[in-house]
Image: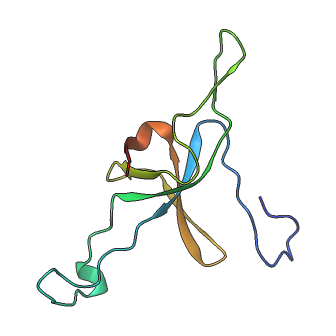
Amino acid sequence: MAKGSKSASATIRPLHDKIIVRRDEAPSKTSSGIFLPESGKERPKSGTVEAVGTGALNTETGERIPLTVRKGDKVIFTSYAGTEVKLDGEELLIMSEDDILAVIED
């Protein structure tokens, strides 16, 4: 959410069951040392959760259903997950928790 149109840096807050994810960087070279051009790189299907919404609304009780992922979690998501947005020159993904396939635990 931008605080005024002249803000030097905007912030973004996901709503309901939405999650903001920073996609991992694509490798720039193969394991054998061959450098990959931008067009040859496959976009990673993993990233780090940057922010989470308040949860989906249970229509029967009116209560929020908490999300199972938290800020800082490393996640794997579906190939076509989310909507790409650019904020202050940085590319982020906004997706539903349903697009998350797994949390990577260390």
What is the x, y in percent for residue 22? 50, 63
Of residue 86 and residue 76, the one placed in the foreground of this image is 76
Residue 20 figure quarter:
bottom right
Q: Residue farthest to the top? A: 60
Quarter occupied by the N terminus: bottom right
Question: In the image, is residue 64 above or below residue 19?
Answer: above
Q: Give the total of numbered labels.
A: 0
What is the x, y in percent for residue 82? 47, 51
Residue 42 figure quarter:
bottom left
Q: Residue farthest to the left? A: 32
Q: Which residue is drawn at 23% across and 80% down?
A: 40
What is the x, y in percent for residue 57? 66, 24
Question: In the image, is residue 18 above or below residue 55?
Answer: below
Answer left or right for 10 relative to 18. right
Q: Which residue is drawn at 76% across and 68% down?
A: 10
Q: Residue at x 34, y 48 (%)?
A: 78
Of residue 50 and residue 86, the one placed in the foreground of this image is 50
Q: Which residue is drawn at 74% across and 63% down?
A: 11
Answer left or right for 29 relative to 45. left
What is the x, y in percent for residue 76? 36, 50
Q: How is the image coloured?
A: rainbow
